[in-house]
Image (spheres, helix red, strand yellow):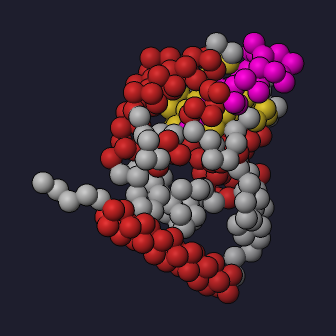
Amino acid sequence: MLGVLAFGDSITNGGGELQWGVALQSWALWTARALGLPYTPYATDGATLRDVLDHQIPAFERRADAPAGPYDVGCLYIGTNDVRGFDWDPLAYERGMREGLEFLGARCERTLTATIPLDLGRPRAGAKVRDANAIIERRAHATGALVVDLAGFRGRRVLMADHVHPTAFGQVAIAECALDVLARDGLAPRTRPSELILPSESTPWRRLRGDATYAYRHAKVSAGAAARRSVSAARRPPRA
């Protein structure tokens, strides 16, 4: 077995600011580390499901020594950029999820996917997220993939001010959820991500500074979202 294979967007690619001394690493990497397995990443920032199918999977097929596997776990977490786009197409997304999950299912002993937080983005992505989650769950059931339920994933500690990208602790929290799902399916971790991190001491001053930074960034994101809504409303043609 070749370990953990991962496709997706910036959430699975990882990278970013330290959080109280903890590096912002991909949830899929934390999962691989906790399982004691090698990690093969192909996720890229800003990716949509179409990017996974048209670029990431072909790149894997070109570069991998064993493109047929077998891998222990295949990860596909994608859809955040799809539902936030103006060209959201649920039918195309369902076809793509089926293709992606079937690709991994043919090469991996277990395939892992995840739903999208309902409180996604500013402005919020809205009802499209529920539609995407229904598709994810339906395609996972049809292909035998395991699902990490992140619909209720939210909060200042685990999400950045944009309500899209996980913090360093958020990536650890997603990995913990993924490991729980894998453990119920018979693949128990050798350790837990929370046991691998050594966060620096949280002092009152550091907490205050962190709260102030988050409040500033959240206000900036909210103001930008309000401005975009105003522009969109102004351009909208009058109703008959």
Q: Position of residue 22 (x, y in %)?
A: 75, 62
Quadrant containing the C terminus is bottom left
Residue 145 vertical placement versus 192 (above, below): above
- Residue drawn at the location 71% of the way across and 50% of the way down: 14
- Residue drawn at the location 77% of the way across and 20% of the way down: 61
Let me know if residue 190 appears in the view.
no
In the figure, residue 158 lies in which quadrant?
bottom right
- Residue drawn at the location 49% of the way across and 77% of the way down: 219
Outermost residue to the right: 65
- Residue drawn at the location 47% of the way across and 22% of the way down: 95
Drawn side of residue 45 relative to residue 94, left or right:
right
Magenta stretch holds residue 57: yes
Q: Nearer the viewer, residue 121 or 205?
A: 121
Quadrant containing the N terminus is top right
Drawn side of residue 102 relative to residue 39, left or right:
left
Q: Position of residue 205 (x, y in %)?
A: 67, 87
Magenta stretch holds residue 48: no
In the figure, residue 165 lies in which quadrant?
bottom right
Outermost residue to the bottom: 205
Q: Nearer the viewer, residue 88 or 207?
A: 88
In the figure, residue 18 lies in which quadrant?
bottom right
* Segment colored magenta: 55-78
